[in-house]
Image (cartoon, grey):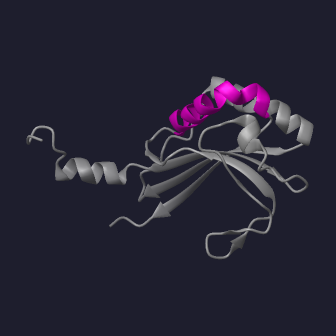
Amino acid sequence: MNAMTQPTDIDLDLRHMTPSVRASFRLTSERHTLDHLLDELGVAGARCWQRGETEGDTLQRRSHGWCVDLPEQRTYSLDDALSQLLAVLAPHRDDIVATIRSLELDAHFGLHVQVAGDRVPACYWSPVNIRTVALYEASLEADIAVSPVA
């Protein structure tokens, strides 16, 4: 790598200051276990959990669940992160929606944001993404956590 392609300290600092966004889609149920959805829906990278399992060190799951998480990304646009998640789900959308309706599942889109200082991303969602979220009859949440600036 030559000096022209190596990131400078300023570039690394700016990248570190850019908000970190993790997009996820969850289906939850208090009545049905959802591990069979791994094979039935066939979404790559999906995972499941059962009510009562421990999450982290102390939190206990209150419902059964199925989830697709995208890798964490650095961006100022929550709409871009949501678009990427919707694109992953798009080939399976009809099957997911049918499953939500037949099992009466709760559907949730989540954008989990970690910001440094006052570097908050744009909390804007395009009309096409809002319409697509509505097709899933899902909630949409964005939680923003602030980490101290080093």
Q: Observer-nearest residue: 36 or 138?
A: 36
Q: Picture quarter containing residue 7? A: top left
Q: Is residue 86 magenta?
A: yes
The majority secondary structure of the magenta stretch comes to: helix
Task: Determine if residue 139 is in view.
Answer: no
Residue at 68%, 48% in the rendered image: 67
Task: Determine if residue 19 is in view.
Answer: yes
Q: Picture quarter containing residue 4? A: top left
Placement of 86 over or under 72, stated as above or below:
above
Q: Residue furthest left?
A: 3
Q: Is residue 128 left or right of residue 17?
A: right
Q: In which quadrant will I find the N terminus?
A: top left
Q: Is residue 119 left or right of residue 92?
A: left
Q: Position of residue 95 (x, y in %)?
A: 78, 29
Numbered marks: total:
0
Q: Position of residue 124 (x, y in %)?
A: 57, 36
Q: Observer-nearest residue: 29 or 19?
A: 29
Q: Residue furthest bottom?
A: 58
Q: Observer-nearest residue: 6 or 34?
A: 34
Q: Position of residue 148 (x, y in %)?
A: 41, 67
Q: Picture quarter containing residue 92? A: top right
Residue at 80%, 31% in the rendered image: 97
Q: Position of residue 13 (x, y in %)?
A: 27, 54
Span colored in magenta: 78-96
Residue at 79%, 69% in the rendered image: 52
Residue at 82%, 46% in the rendered image: 106
Q: In which quadrant will I find the C terminus?
A: bottom left
Q: Residue furthest front?
A: 39
Q: Observer-nearest residue: 136 or 79?
A: 136
Q: Is residue 71 magenta?
A: no
